[in-house]
Amino acid sequence: MFSHIMIGANDIEQSKVFYDAILGTLGHKPGVIDEKGRCFYFTDSGIFALTKPINGEVASHGNGTTIGFAAQNPAQADVWHAAGVANGGTSCEEPPGIREGGLGKLYLAYLKDPSGNKVCVLHRLG
């Protein structure tokens, strides 16, 4: 469905450390910085990218916005969450764990990145 997702970051290097850590736990390669100072994570299914806002203003998070990444199992989600906290992220929402709702049983963990963007990792159970 998506070709890419690009989010704003105030400090690309600090954000790269955070995303290299959390995305590395999911098996993705470290980000690549281009000539414009943007950071790209290339996968077979799309691209995730970080950029300073082109209007020169401070990057800000979207209230109500969450970017979700897929985990292979709950253990991988826990490692993702721990790596994020250890690399400049902040835990948010409830602690990592099972949530039940209209979409069935999900194992979720949430973080805010160094610029305040909310990200999560999700594993569908059964």
Image (cartoon, rainbow, N blue to C red):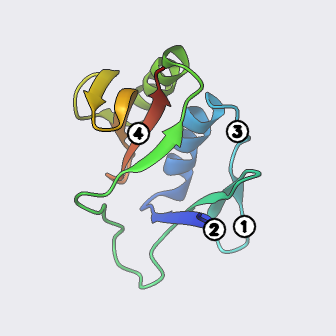
Does the CB distance between marks 2 and 1 fall below 8 Å?
A: yes
Three-letter amino acid code at the position of disc 1: Asp
For disc 3, the marked residue is: 28
User: Where residue 17 appears, x then y in whole percent?
Assistant: 56, 41
**Precedes in sequence: disc 1 or disc 4:** 1
Circle 4 residues within 10 Å: few <14, some 14–19, many ≥20:
many
Residues under numbered marks 1 and 4 in contact, where contact means CB atoms less than 8 Å apart: no
Q: Nearer the viewer, mark 1 or mark 3?
A: 3
User: Which residue is at the far top?
Assistant: 75
Q: CA distance from mark 3 to mark 4?
A: 16 Å
Type of amino acid at the residue the image marks with label 3: His
Image quadrant in which the N terminus is located? bottom right
Mark 1 crowdedness (10 Å alpha carbons): few <14, some 14-19, many ≥20: few
On residue 120, the disc is 4
The local crowd at label 2, few if under 14, some if 14 to 19, many if 20 or more residues have their Cα within 10 Å, is: few
Residue 58 occupies quadrant = bottom left
Q: Is residue 87 visible?
A: no
Q: Position of residue 79 (x, y in %)?
A: 51, 19
Question: Residue drawn 41% across and 81% down?
Answer: 56
Badge 3 crowding class, 10 Å Cα cut-off, few under 14, some 14 to 19, many 20 or more, is: some
- Disc 2 and disc 1: Cα gap in Å? 5 Å
Is the C-beta separation of discs 2 and 4 under 8 Å? Answer: no
Residue that carries the numbered disc 2 in the rendered image: 37
Residue for badge 1? 34
Q: Mark 2 or mark 4, which has the lower sequence index?
A: 2
**Circle 3: element type:** loop
In this rendering, the answer to whether 70 lies above or below 36 is above
**Residue 81 percent across, percent down from the top left:** 43, 26
Calculate the distance from the C-alpha at mark 2 to the C-alpha at mark 4.
25 Å
Q: Earlier in the sequence, mark 3 or mark 2?
A: 3
